[in-house]
């Protein structure tokens, strides 16, 4: 047995529970992925990059950084890329948090947050969501103190699907000390149709402590490639790069992300299809007597005990959903998959 002494924080870290399911054998509505197959031009770009697999990629994903900077009309030094937005978040937290510090975020939210915060040695301040599954911004503000290294906002929030408005986020940022990093995780931004929802990229010029996270894993359908990015002030971007593992983004992931970005029209069409499906499923369920909230993500949320019944009824028909102690989250898939889900839960008493 190994005698290696590991850092004490490791003993306390919760394990990441990935959504279950083999997308080929079962209907996988458990990981908020896009259900569409990868577009031929993205596959081609990846194959082309593979030819040079003997060479290291750019240490910082410079080709993708440049494309993103031009898309957001930002200088290159305000954009950082990583192998998934999770990695950009991990780096950002490493840059600001350590033992003795705390990180404030709403809960329940993305389950990677407690793990990433725990790794830094800082403590998590989890602020319960409101009864409507929204961030309690007043309580989050009140939880910030002299030891707060960062606050994480998630909009739309995984798993509840609620969004923050631009006004809410602007007012919040105005009251947080500028020395505290505020991360706005917008992994599901492209699916958000909720009224007045925030667009973090528009707030960057006003707040130099803001880091906006976006990803190619959701709307662009490239979860398996691992590619995400952050937009922030030059100082935050520089700090993230300092703690980043060099060559974190593979050449294949970078080439595919560049190809995906070059065809935004395709991304928008696919996102639109998911949004329409989301609205169809929500309407069908409301007609059947379910009381479900609007969602800004590519998923819907069933809070409370009824979640267990939904999870079990779906599973009995080979459909994987994602259960939490507070409810169940169901990803919007292809029309046929959503119909299978609706049929599977038709016997469950609406909650
Ligand atoms: C809120 C949120 N942020 C980030 C991620 C992860 O994104 P990535 O695949 O870019 O690491 C997820 C994935 O489920 C998520 O739900």
Image (spheres, rainbow, N blue to C red):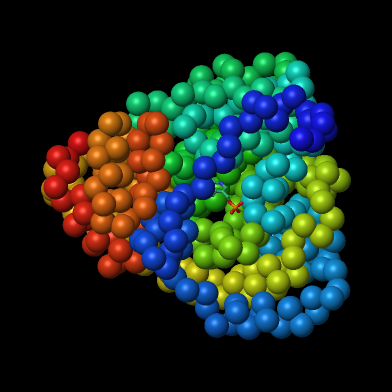
Reply above or below: 110 against 275: above
Q: Residue at x 28, y 67 (%)?
A: 336
Quadrant of the image for the C terminus?
A: top left
Q: Residue furthest front?
A: 1
> Residue placed at 35% from the left, 26% from the top?
131
Left or right: where does residue 224 sit relative to residue 326? right
Where residue 39 appears, x then y in whole percent? 52, 78
Q: Is residue 190 above or below residue 263?
A: above
Instruction: Return the x and y of residue 168 as percentages of the image width and height.
Output: 50, 33
Left or right of 37, for residue 45:
right
Whether residue 143 is situated above or below residue 168 in the rendered picture: above
Residue 48: percent from left, percent from top = 71, 83
Residue 40 visible in the shown view? yes
Query: Depth check: 197 or 7 in front?
Result: 7
Q: Quadrant of residue 240?
A: top right
Q: Can residue 166 be seen by looking at this rendering?
A: no
In which quadrant of the rendered image does the N terminus lie? top right
**Rendered residue at 30%/63% (across/down):** 337
Q: For the image shown, how many numbered marks are present on the structure?
A: 0
Q: Considering depth in this image, is 341 or 174 the residue closer to the camera?
A: 341
Q: Residue 5 versus residue 237: which sits nearer the camera?
A: 5
Q: Residue at x 52, y 65 (%)?
A: 221
């Amino acid at each position: 047995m190994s005698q290696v002494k590991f850092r004490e924080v490791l003993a306390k870290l919760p394990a990441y529970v990935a959504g279950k399911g083999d997308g080929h054998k079962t209907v996988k509505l458990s990981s908020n992925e896009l259900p569409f197959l990868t577009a031929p031009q993205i596959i081609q770009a990846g194959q082309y990059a593979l030819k040079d697999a003997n060479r290291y990629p750019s240490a910082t994903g410079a080709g993708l950084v440049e494309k993103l900077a031009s898309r957001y009309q930002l200088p290159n030094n305000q954009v950082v890329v990583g192998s998934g937005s999770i990695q950009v978040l991990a780096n950002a937290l490493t840059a600001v948090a350590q033992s003795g510090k705390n990180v404030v975020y709403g809960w329940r939210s993305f389950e990677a947050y407690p793990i990433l915060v725990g790794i830094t040695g800082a403590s998590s301040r989890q602020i319960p969501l409101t009864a409507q599954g929204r961030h309690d911004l007043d309580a989050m503000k009140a939880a910030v103190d002299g030891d707060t290294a960062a606050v994480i906002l998630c909009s739309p929030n995984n798993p509840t699907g609620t969004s923050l408005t631009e006004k809410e986020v602007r007012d919040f940022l105005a009251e947080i000390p500028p020395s505290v990093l505020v991360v706005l995780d917008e992994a599901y931004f492209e699916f958000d149709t909720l009224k007045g929802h925030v667009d973090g990229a528009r707030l960057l010029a006003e707040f130099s402590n803001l880091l906006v996270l976006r990803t190619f894993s959701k709307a662009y359908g490239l979860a398996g490639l691992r590619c995400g990015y952050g937009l922030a002030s030059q100082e935050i971007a520089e700090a993230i790069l300092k703690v980043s593992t060099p060559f974190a983004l593979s050449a294949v992931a970078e080439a595919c992300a560049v190809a995906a970005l070059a065809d935004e029209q395709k991304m928008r069409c696919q996102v639109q299809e998911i949004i329409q499906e989301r609205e169809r499923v929500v309407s069908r369920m409301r007609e059947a007597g379910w009381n479900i909230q609007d969602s800004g993500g590519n998923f819907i949320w069933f809070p409370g005990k009824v979640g267990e019944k939904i999870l079990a009824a779906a599973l009995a028909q080979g459909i994987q959903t994602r259960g939490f102690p507070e409810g169940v989250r169901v990803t919007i898939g292809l029309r046929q998959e959503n119909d299978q889900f609706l049929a599977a839960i038709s016997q469950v008493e609406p909650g």
